[in-house]
Image (spheres, rainbow, N blue to C red):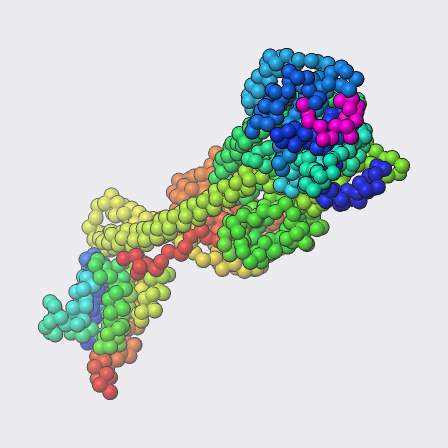
């Protein structure tokens, strides 16, 4: 709280505001007269000291007299009846002709009420407008009502009410002001003359309208201060009146205003002001606040009534329109929710999907930043604390004794003081926890409100300064309010929290569904693996058995009866034997291929030069036979791989290089190079026959052969398929470049780390039977 | 040396058994050869129960050649059964199979097989294998004397 000395009034210290007994000021505003009457005689037992000015009778002469003395005979009976009735306020305003001491009479609006057993009668001089046409008002009011009723949401309702009240009253500025949970205020709508400072969007600290003032706003729905620089007219009472205690003027329209408030209005540059209370569910929701900067402004009773009516009418719409405001937001949240859900199911990594643009994750809760922390990985969107700060925050969240599903605060500092250093991005936090124990979270951040809220109007306009003292002015108030909300973010609305809660549930559903899907896939995979396994082995066994039979019997026939056979028959028997051998090698290749996919790799940092040397040693006879030259321009860098499998890969590639080669001088080159994207790329290059581009994919298909069986030494067509599978098992890639007729280069990378197999190892065969 | 020992062949494939018999003959293996074509039958033979209740029809073999893939009770179970039976476990069992599955090989030795032979699709190789089998198992290997019953008494 500031303790600025305000204006010139020494007692007007803001810290006193909450204690000032503003309902018993002992004085009124002098534009009317207040009389307190004793029933049923209507004796005037208290009166304001300004009776001389308005009624032409000195107050001392009036006290102890009956009101009837002031009325013309023809008004006495009806006035008595009105004032003494139980529902006297229904008759307001009484149109009274008060006999002036000078002989003439003057028209007054009489406004009567009872409070604490006292009968109050306030007299305001009727304006020149004489009889305001009732129908004019009626039509105006009716138009206003339908416009308010048809407002599509809260914002429209506020705009409509502000302009309606301005039209009715002619005040220079009308604002709609709403209280938050802490009684800070915010200007939601404004209708003003052009020269008036804009207040739209300004926030005011709760101290601007102290508690007891708010209570009076509940009692009195409309307060008018026609001239802020009035001199209060004190109340004067008959001696015996004093025993009744101070006069409680809570319901008096003329009640004198607290000096602090007057100062405030003067500092605002207001010559006159009026406020109309807005209630929701019996509580003060806000105010329609009018100020006049071009001097004083008096409004006759009828106009005030019309304004009060607008206020009440607006109040009656608040629940629906405000609900509707949120309803709109909720509908929006639901559609965002739907889109986020659709996104999450789009890819495997739901966190990455959530954090992609457009930032709907932020829109969902009206946050400026978010972080998704899932299985130890953090993905960030918008304005968020640094990674280190996030880690600390996660640790703190995890350590909280009660882990709620949703934890929300608009002042994280209070709960987690370490957040001081990043309150500029995370003064407010929603943390949705998605799993017990594992600490997976979605976090939403909101910056300090001070950095969120815009000034109304020109932020660069300096605060008014008078006598080197900053004057209390809405801007000053705004600054003061900013001080009170340091370290706080705007509060999270219900529908925003609901959005977070809904998303949390969706994520849990999706993650659950995912893991179930994975489990199912795994089970399927396992089963198909097992089936493949048993198929491969059963096939090998069951196919080989008859094959062996055919082979053996054909061999026996050839051995024992070759001489007796016709040459053609012998050729045919030879063919049968050869076919059985080829069939066997096909079966063996297939079996081997099936194994490669699932064998355990033993990954170690391996010297590939040594691997290559072993391979070349093994291939020596074939290399010599083909008279092929082996070129190794530079030693190969080491790799994390399975030595035995790499031998197999090199063997296959080098064998192919010399096999599919029709040059006189065959050569094969083995080397490596570094590539920025891929890291180390190994290659096996030859000057062989080359492979046409249309076959670049096909050659990797199992049993796919590009050449006749008996050309280039034959083969089953599984070699490259197996090499590709081996490389892929190493998390690497295999591809080729080739110019037909000139040669082929096979490239491969070795990821080193194999991806964790998504499969569970198939059970031992004995479990399958 | 071990020429008197009966050899039990557990083999469901007639052609394979036919080849085996022929090759035994051609490499001059004198041992009496018995054949069971199913797992259950082998157990009856070894236990001298069921259709082999007559000991004459089912002498205790000195060596078993066992195919793994049998209809019904398969070779692995026969092997386990033999090696669990204290009267039978001293009989050397040679697995004689088409399957080169490392798991099969591993489990055969785990369960006490004395050797694992792969049936080749190649007649000359097959003949060489049987010749070596004869030299090793029938001419050089020292076999246990009794059927294990004496040992169990001691």
Q: Furthest-right residue in view? A: A467
- Position of A253 relative to A367 (above/below): above
Q: Position of residue A608 (x, y in %)?
A: 57, 57
Q: Is residue A437 magenta?
A: no
The answer to whether residue B27 is left or right of residue A528 is: left
Q: Is residue A708 above or below residue A386?
A: above
- Asked if residue A460 shows in the view, the reply is no
Q: Quadrant of the C terminus of chain A?
A: bottom left
Where is residue A653 drawn, in percent x and y?
50, 49
| Residue A262 visible to an observer of this rendering | yes
User: In the rendered image, which quarter contains the N terminus of chain A?
Assistant: top right
Q: Position of residue A641 (x, y in %)?
A: 53, 56
Residue drawn where x is 76% and y is 22% of the image: A55
Q: Nearer the viewer, residue A99 or A713?
A: A99
Residue bounds of the magenta highlight: A51-68
Rendering quarter of residue A157: top right
A63 inside magenta stretch:
yes
């Amino acid at each position: 709280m500031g303790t600025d000395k305000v204006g010139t009034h020494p007692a007007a210290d803001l810290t006193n505001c909450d204690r000032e007994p503003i309902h018993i000021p002992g004085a009124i505003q002098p534009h009317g007269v207040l009389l307190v009457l004793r029933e049923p005689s209507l004796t005037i037992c208290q009166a304001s000291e300004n009776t001389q000015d308005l009624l032409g009778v000195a107050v001392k002469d009036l006290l102890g007299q009956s009101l009837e003395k002031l009325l013309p005979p023809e008004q006495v009976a009806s006035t008595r009846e009105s004032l003494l009735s139980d529902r006297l306020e229904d008759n307001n305003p009484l149109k009274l002709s008060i006999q002036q001491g000078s002989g003439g009479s003057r028209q007054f609006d009489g406004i009567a009420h009872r409070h604490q057993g006292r009968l109050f009668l306030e007299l305001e001089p009727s304006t020149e407008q004489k009889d305001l046409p009732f129908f004019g008002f009626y039509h105006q009011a009716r138009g206003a009502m339908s416009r308010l009723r048809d407002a599509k949401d809260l914002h429209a309702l506020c705009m409509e009410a502000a302009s309606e009240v301005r039209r009715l009253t002619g005040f220079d500025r009308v604002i709609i002001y709403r209280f938050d949970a802490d009684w800070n205020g915010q200007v939601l709508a404004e209708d003003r003359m052009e020269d008036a400072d804009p207040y739209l969007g300004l926030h005011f600290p709760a101290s601007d309208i102290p508690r007891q003032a708010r209570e009076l706003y509940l009692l009195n729905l409309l307060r008018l201060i026609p001239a802020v620089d009035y001199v209060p007219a004190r109340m004067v009472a008959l001696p015996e009146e004093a025993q009744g205690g101070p006069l409680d003027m809570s319901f008096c329209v003329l009640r004198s205003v607290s000096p602090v408030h007057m100062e405030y209005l003067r500092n605002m540059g207001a010559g006159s002001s009026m406020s109309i209370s807005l209630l929701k569910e019996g509580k003060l929701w806000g105010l329609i606040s009018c100020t006049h900067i071009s001097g004083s402004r008096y409004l006759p009773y009828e106009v005030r009534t019309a304004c009060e009516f607008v206020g009440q009418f607006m109040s009656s719409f608040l629940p629906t329109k405000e609900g509707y405001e949120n309803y709109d937001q909720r509908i929006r949240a639901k559609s965002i929710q739907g889109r986020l859900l659709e996104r999450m199911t789009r890819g495997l990594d739901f966190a990455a999907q959530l954090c992609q643009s457009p930032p709907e994750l932020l829109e969902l809760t009206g946050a400026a930043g978010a972080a998704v922390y899932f299985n130890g990985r953090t993905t960030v969107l918008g304005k968020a604390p640094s990674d280190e700060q996030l880690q600390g925050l996660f640790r703190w969240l995890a350590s909280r004794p009660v882990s709620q599903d949703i934890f929300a605060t608009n002042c994280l500092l209070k709960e987690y003081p370490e957040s001081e250093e990043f309150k500029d991005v995370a003064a407010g936090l929603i943390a949705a926890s998605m799993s017990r124990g594992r600490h997976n979270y979605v976090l939403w951040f909101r910056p300090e409100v001070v950095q969120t809220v815009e000034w109304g109007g020109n932020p660069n306009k300096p605060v008014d300064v008078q006598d080197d003292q900053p004057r209390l002015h809405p801007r000053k108030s705004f600054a003061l309010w900013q001080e009170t909300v340091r370290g706080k973010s705007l509060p999270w609305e219900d529908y925003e929290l609901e959005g977070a809660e809904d998303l949390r549930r969706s994520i849990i559903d999706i993650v659950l569904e995912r893991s179930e899907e994975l489990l199912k896939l795994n089970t399927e995979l396992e089963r198909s693996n097992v089936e493949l396994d048993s198929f491969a082995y059963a096939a090998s066994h069951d196919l080989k058995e008859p094959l062996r039979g055919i082979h053996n019997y054909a061999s026996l026939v050839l051995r024992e009866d070759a001489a007796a056979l016709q040459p053609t028959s012998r050729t045919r028997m030879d063919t049968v034997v050869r076919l059985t051998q080829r069939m066997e090698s096909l079966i063996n290749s297939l079996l081997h291929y099936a194994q490669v996919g699932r064998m355990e790799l033993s990954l170690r940092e391996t010297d590939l030069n040594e691997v290559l040397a072993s391979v070349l040693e093994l291939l020596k006879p074939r290399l010599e036979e083909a008279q092929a030259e082996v070129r190794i321009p530079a030693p190969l860098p080491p790799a994390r791989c399975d030595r035995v499998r790499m031998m197999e890969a090199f063997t296959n590639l080098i064998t192919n290089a010399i096999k599919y080669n029709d040059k006189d001088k065959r050569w094969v080159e083995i080397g490596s190079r570094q590539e920025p994207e891929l890291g180390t790329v190994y290659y096996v290059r030859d000057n062989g026959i080359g492979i046409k581009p249309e076959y670049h994919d096909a050659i990797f298909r199992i049993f796919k052969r590009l050449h006749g069986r008996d050309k280039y030494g034959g083969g089953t067509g599984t070699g490259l398929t197996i090499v590709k599978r081996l490389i892929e098992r190493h998390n690497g890639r295999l591809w080729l470049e080739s110019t037909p007729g000139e040669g082929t280069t096979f490239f491969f990378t070795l990821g080193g780390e194999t991806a964790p197999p998504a499969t569970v190892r198939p059970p031992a065969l004995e479990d399958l039977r | 040396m071990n020429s008197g020992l009966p050899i039990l062949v557990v083999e469901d494939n007639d052609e394979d058994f036919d080849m085996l018999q022929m090759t035994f003959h051609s490499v001059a293996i004198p041992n009496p050869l018995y054949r069971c074509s199913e797992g259950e039958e082998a157990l009856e033979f070894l236990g001298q129960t069921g259709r082999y209740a007559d000991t004459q029809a089912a002498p205790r073999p000195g060596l078993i050649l066992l195919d793994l893939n049998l209809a019904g009770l398969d070779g692995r179970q026969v092997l386990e059964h033999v090696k669990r039976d204290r009267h039978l476990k001293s009989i050397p069992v040679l697995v004689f199979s088409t399957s080169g599955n490392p798991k099969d090989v591993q489990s055969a030795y785990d369960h006490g097989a004395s050797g694992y032979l792969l049936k080749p699709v190649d007649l000359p190789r097959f003949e060489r294998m049987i010749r070596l089998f004869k030299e090793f198992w029938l001419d050089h290997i020292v076999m246990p004397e009794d059927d294990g019953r004496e040992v169990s008494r001691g």
